[in-house]
Image: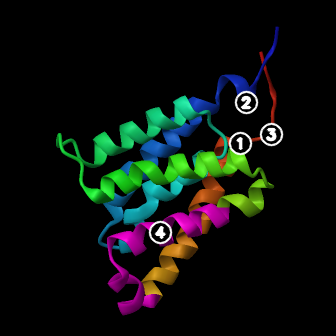
Amino acid sequence: MKKTFSTCSKFPVALAVCLLALVLPAYLRATFPVLSDLPLMVLIGLAFMLDLGELAVLVLLSVYFLNWQPRPSLDLLLFAVLPILAWAWHRAWPMVLWLSVPLAAVLGVTIFWAVLGWTFLWNDPLVFGETIGLAVVATSCAVLIAHAKEKTVR
């Protein structure tokens, strides 16, 4: 029996993309301050191609990587819930990926910052616009990387 790319390599690729999204903002925070939301954006994008168990592993790994303290804060709880909600939204109302992934990313980042503080949205709309643009690009790239065409693996 031949395995396809989607059945044997989707989770390791998603794990690599998630780890890259977790490490990259730490190195580029001074140059690109909008990268702080990159792990959330990537998890929302990966919610459209992973099973719930695989997504839960990535979410728990990301929450542990971002804050290993025993008591989670509101932003970490929201960080963990938004990708799960994106997964449920995709399962309830399946749409084409090129439309649903950027829409979920924009909604996820907007909800994240709306709950944590509206002042960020109104005080600096240019940075919020950059964050939304990065959300669309990051989630689309995560989906393209982890959801490649099925190819036969020998």
Relative to 20, say whether 129 is above or below. Answer: below
Rendered residue at 42%/66% (across/down): 112
Which mark is nearer the camera, 4 or 2? 4
Lower sequence index among marks 1 and 2:
2
Task: Give how far across and how far down residue 134 sits, in percent.
Answer: 54, 70
Amino acid type at circle 1 is His
Per the rendering, the mark at residue 26 is: none
Neighbour tally class for label 2: few under 14, some 14-19, many 20 plus, Cα within 10 Å: some
Amino acid type at circle 3 is Lys
Tell me the CA gap for discs 4 and 3: 32 Å
Amino acid type at circle 2 is Ser
- The residue that label 3 is drawn on is 149
Secondary-structure class at tag 3 = loop
Taking the image as drawn, is residue 43 in sight? no
Which mark is nearer the camera, 4 or 1? 4
Q: Quadrant of residue 105?
A: bottom right
Tell me the CA gap for discs 4 and 2: 31 Å
Amino acid type at circle 4 is Ile
- The residue that label 4 is drawn on is 111
Lower sequence index among marks 4 and 3:
4
Q: Quadrant of residue 36?
A: bottom left
Look at the image and give the residue range highlighted in magenta.
102-125
Rendered residue at 62%/37% (across/down): 50
Tell me the CA gap for discs 3 and 1: 7 Å
- The residue that label 1 is drawn on is 147
Task: Give how far across and how far down residue 29 sits, in percent.
Answer: 32, 67
Per the rendering, the mark at residue 6 is: 2
Taking the image as drawn, is residue 125 in sight? yes
Rendered residue at 35%/91% (across/down): 123
